Image (cartoon, rainbow, N blue to C red):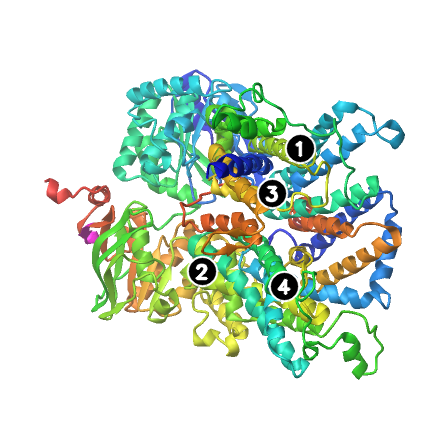
Amino acid sequence: MSEVTENAGRLDAVAPAIELIGISKAFGPVQANKDISMTVAKGAIHGIVGENGAGKSTLMSILYGFYKADKGSVKIDGAPTVISDSHDAIAAGIGMVHQHFMLVENFTVLENVILGAEDGATLGSSRRRARKELKELADEYELDVNPDAVIEDISVGFQQRVEILKALYRQAEILILDEPTGVLTPDEADHLFRILRNLKEQGKTIVIITHKLREIMDVTDSVSVMRRGEMTKTIATATTSPEDLAEAMVGRRVLLEVDKKPAVVGETVMEVRDLSVTDIHGVKKLKHVSLELKRGEILGIAGVAGNGQSELLEVISGIGAATSGEVLMHGESIDVSKHANAQLRRHRGISHVPEDRHQRGLVMPFMTWENTAFGYHNEPEYSGKFGLANQKYMLEDARGKMERFDIRPVIPTLVAHHFSGGNQQKIVLAREIERNPDVLLIGQPTRGVDIGAIEFIHQQIVNLRDAGKAILLVSVELDEIQALSDRILVMFDGVIQGERMPEDTNEGELGLLMAGVDPEAQS
Amino acid sequence: MNKNLPKWVDLGLIPLLTLFLAFAVSGLVVMSIGQNPIEVVRVMIQGAFNPFGIGHTLYFTTNFIFTGLAVAVAFHARLFNIGGEGQAGIAGVGVTLIMLSVDWPHWTVALVAGTVAAMAFGAAWAAIPAYLQAKRGSHIVITTIMFNLIATAVVGYLLVGPLQAEGSLPESPKFPDGAALPTLHDILGVVGIEFDRFAPVNISFFLALIAALLVWILIWKTRLGYEMRAFGHSERAAVYAGISPMKITMVAMLISGALSGMMAVNTVQGEAERLVLGAVEGAGFIGIAVALMGRSHPVGVLLAAFLFGILTQGGAELQFALGIPAQMITVIQALIIMFTGSLENMVRIPLEKIFLNTGKRGQA
Amino acid sequence: MMDFLTNDLLQLSDSAIRFATPLLLACLAGLYSERAGIFDIGLEGKMLVAAFAAGAFSALAGMSVDDGGWNMGGAAVWVGLLAAIIASIIMAMIHAFASITLRGNQLISGVAINFFAAGITVLIGQYWFKMGGQTPQLHEGQRFEPIILPFAKSLQDVPVLGPVYHDLISGHNIIVYLSFVIVALTWLILYRTRFGLRMRAVGENPGAVDTAGISVVKLRYSALIITGILCGLAGAYLSLGTAAAGFGKDMTSGRGFIALAALIFAKWKPIPAMWATLLFGMLEAVGSKYQTLDLGFMVLPGQFMQALPYILTVVILAGFVGKAIPPKAGGEPYVKER
């Protein structure tokens, strides 16, 4: 397995920057890492890919001392190093940019950089030194940020820079980035990659965790693949392809395409007119959005997370309120004020698979039979007399749904926690699809779902379309949008930036639209 | 709550072990003030169950069922109602106002009127913190604490002012005779069973049992209870399902306040037959311990309330027999709250390790 | 009018400072705890235990050997103070163990501490002194005495400033002056030191602190030790520094909660905490000086003054007078994300 790495090691003729030997880690009954060994050459950009829950973040968190390995050892620059907490990791020259930034939101950039790396018991000299060094780092690596800006006032792209600056200020020689582009526009991602290449030229070693194969191909020198807590292979990037990596991630050949017939599009079911949303901080999240949704089509909404897609789904589904504009269903206006009622919305035939199934779609400590009626629990078939619930029917109904959607084990009294991500998503999907809605709103249908379940879920969505229903799909995965949609809208900064037919466009064009650039206007 | 432990461990063993620890530490406290724990237990049990004591034990149990249910109902909607003390206090004012306003013809009418008044006043006192939590995000723990203290001032003012009976004592006039509730002595007498005629336990005890049954139905069988539990587990999920946080917060707290308030039927109408200063006597706070120990389940609440009834009555006996201040019970109550409510992981983490290991061996 | 200013107002302000001192100390105690991410509704209990320890040990230390005491003379008061601080730290450490190490519910352990304090002080007090939970009356050497500041007497006749200096500023005991010093010290610690930076960070985002290589657990324990010390001072003031001269059952009588209210009022900041507690101290002073308050158009009962701090807190919490935003990580035990 490690022929390539060994070669890479010899080529360098210096000790590898990172050497992990036989790392194992269990969380309760879950074995997150099983006997993992990995080598990263000094000055390389190394990628780690794998599905959700494959153990990538755990492995890197162990390297960063955030978790303690049950077994195994670490060598940094050839020297055996014990890393029992983040303090040790920092001392060993390791820095990490977590997926969820570890910043104190009401602190300034400067305070965040100093925190934990102060010069002495008082702060005066730390502040002066940090201010000076931030300036130098900014000039060297294109990492400009205002040191006096408060974190909660700056964009995620800038927040990420602060995280990188934190690591560099601590003199990190090894930089780990966990899913760094998840929140970035393609443009910002490119900027990040420039910074990373720049760092590499200065001799720094970089490890990127991602599930986006394209990024791996673009930016890394070598790549490791993880599956179910094990490292399945490590290979030089130049000698592999996305297809090979995908296969290694899943363990079998994967259909990256969805099998579907051409759409038979009917009349308009839902119309969104001039919809705007302003949040409690006065930020405009949605700006005069209009769209039409027709029978028998999947309308895909592409865009980087946080560009108004969530708000759009929330308003249509009755969770959030619009500041202005209207939504028509079969030509009739529906309530989009703060008095809107999500149950009423369901009653009118609008079902909703939410973006976040842990926080919204399911009540995690609820049993499956309670979850399969969630949101519909006041519908007549689930209701008994005197405000009681018809629990007998709820149980039967849950069992049927579990069987039809292949949710295993078929035990309706099992709580949602017990199921895998894929099965949890299928519980939500079974509930929403089996209502036979006129409109299905669906956000991030396959986030955190294993690839086997992805195929099943995609097929269910296509089947619903073929049954003549209208589907509004929101996903930050461009691949998914392209594979499923019959028509694509791209959102940027609360505006619909453009509309394309999937057959007439490509990733490049969509990427530009997602960054707020109109390619047609440019040329 | 936990997926790694069998249900009997989660709901049976852990509460018992934490309770055992609480009692063990209580034993140490008893020894530290130079007393013999075994003697103390003997005196308490004897005091709580002798023919005179049992009537008091059940009387206190009644209070704790009400306040325990009150805390439990709020817990299901993830609301920590520390305001039982104030809600019960204000409910006492409500009972007093209605009892003094009419010359009651028969206790049945008086019972209904007293219960309605107690529930209404208790709920009203919970309504403001509930509204502020739901609408303005004011932390309900702090606001209910503040409302307890405000209630003390209000009741104090009324009992030396508008509601004060003639004389210098801070208490209201006695209620008309028609308002008096049948005691357990009266009730059991009908079927020919002898019971201490001076015992304060009265018909409210049965009211408490009915309340426990209704709470069980509410939480586990009704759609409202389903919505409350969903909201308690995840507010975001509740909103997604079209469950109004405002409605659930208000409803849960109103029910909670009403339950706390019902305690006043037992104490003010059933026992004292007038409003006196400090009528709640900490029962609102004991409700927290009762709900924690009873895992917010009505059956658990009944058992825990009975235990605290025994402790309270037995504790009073300690004073007579051994000269130990009644604060002994406050200490035990504190330790039970501490161990079952906050130190639970002391027991849970080792147990999880044990079960994980046996589980692994089972698989191998 | 001049009379009112010079006499009544000065006298009221003077007693406002006295009433404010324990509130201020407890409020600052809560500030450390809550800024570090531990909600502390157990201030009342910590203070009560401290007040008891102060009263009991000062009494014991001052008693003659024949009476079972240690005959320590003037050192007795310091023995009392030390005992108060130690007792309060023990309570704070129990709170810390429950909420930091065992990741238990912070509010519930706070409630438990309050009850434990209410019970144990009377139990032990009765066992030791057989006075129904009271501790013996404290005499000279067992209490903190007023300190007359330099020139207070000679400057007394200077118009306006003289009486202010003599009646208001001079003549308090050491803990009163100390508490105001601690306000300044707290400000410095919070905003100018490494410990303060880390403590503020751990109350907002413990993950950021952890990944910066700093121990969340140590930091939070340190903050709670300071909370213990300050509650110790507050409790000691009640039994050693007021006219009570000894411990009485439930002598904190809700001050821990008023301090909590003041902390919210002050938005978890030290200087505003001083003004908030002085305001609440003034309310208490007015309430104890006038049984009822005649405002001309209406008469307010004394109980209204008693309840006013609580009512004000509710109004503040309701966000009608500037929103009070607590430290973000407060109330939640820190568990590494998984």
Q: Position of residue C141 (x, y in %)?
A: 74, 26
Q: Would residue A7 be seen by someone viewing this image from the given angle?
A: yes
Amino acid residing under circle 4: Leu
Characterize the local packing of mark 4: few (<14), some (14-19) or many (20 or more) Cα atoms within 10 angstroms: many
Amino acid residing under circle 3: Gly
Res C241 label:
1
Residue C12 relative to residue B277: left or right: left
Q: Position of residue C106 (x, y in %)?
A: 59, 44
> What residue is pinned by disc 3?
C256
Tag 4–tag 2 contact (CB < 8 Å): no
Q: For numbered disc 4, what is the local secondary structure?
A: helix
> What residue is pinned by disc 2?
B245
Residue B154 relative to residue A521: left or right: right
Q: Position of residue A267 (x, y in %)?
A: 20, 69
Q: Would residue C36 be seen by someone viewing this image from the given angle?
A: no
Amino acid residing under circle 1: Gly
Observer-nearest of B219 and A446: B219
Q: For numbered disc 2, what is the local secondary structure?
A: helix
Tag 3–tag 2 contact (CB < 8 Å): no
Observer-nearest of C210 and C256: C256
Characterize the local packing of mark 2: few (<14), some (14-19) or many (20 or more) Cα atoms within 10 angstroms: many
